[in-house]
Amino acid sequence: MADKNIMAAGDILEKLEQVIQSRKGSDPETSYVARLFHKGRKKIAQKVGEEGVETALAGVLDDRGEVVAESADLLFHLLVLWADMDIATEEIYAELARREGLSGIEEKNSRQEEDQ
């Protein structure tokens, strides 16, 4: 059960999104986020991939605490990628809302039909 003192997921992601946005153009010597932006999208995307793999591996090892930690890293790096691409979290929320009520199979099939 979640702690009542912890912010709602959307709130914490929005706050983190604001912090990440504020780091654009900051000094890469003093900010990890600014350093990622400075290195470019390829490096940012690489970090998303690394964190995704680390999360998956922790899951395979049944390491709950590590899955939690790596999931936080993954979400953080996703937010950096979204910021680099000027994607607001609201766009992701809207896409999730669009998919609500669809079965995973229906949703996947609808994307395949759009690609044809």
Image (cartoon, helix red, strand yellow):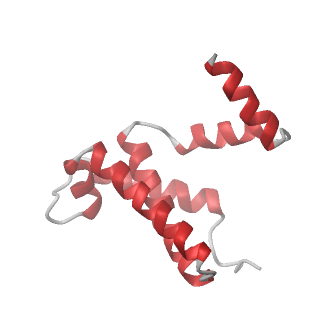
Foreground residue, 43 or 53? 53
Residue 16 lies left or right of residue 41; in this view the side is right
Question: In the image, is residue 50 above or below residue 82?
Answer: below
How many numbered discs, if any? 0
Residue 14 at x, y percent in the picture: 53, 54
**Vertical comparison of 113 with 27: above or below:** above
Q: Position of residue 27 (x, y in %)?
A: 16, 57
Q: Return the x and y of residue 96 as percentages of the image width and height.
A: 69, 42
Q: Residue at x 81, y 34 (%)?
A: 106
Horizontal relation, residue 80 to residue 59: left or right: left
Q: Quadrant of the C terminus?
A: top right
Q: Nearer the viewer, residue 8 or 110?
A: 110
Q: Is residue 54 above or below residue 1?
A: above
* Residue 102 vertical position relative to residue 13 in the rendered view, above or below: above
Residue 102: where, in percent of width, then height? Answer: 83, 38
Residue drawn at (47%, 38%) of the image: 87
Residue 83 location, quadrant: top left
At horizontal 30% and vertical 43% (from top left) the residue drawn is: 41
Residue 6 falls in image quadrant: bottom right
Q: Quadrant of the N terminus?
A: bottom right
Farthest top residue in view: 116
Residue visible at 59% across and 80% down in the picture: 61
Q: Is residue 71 left or right of residue 17?
A: right
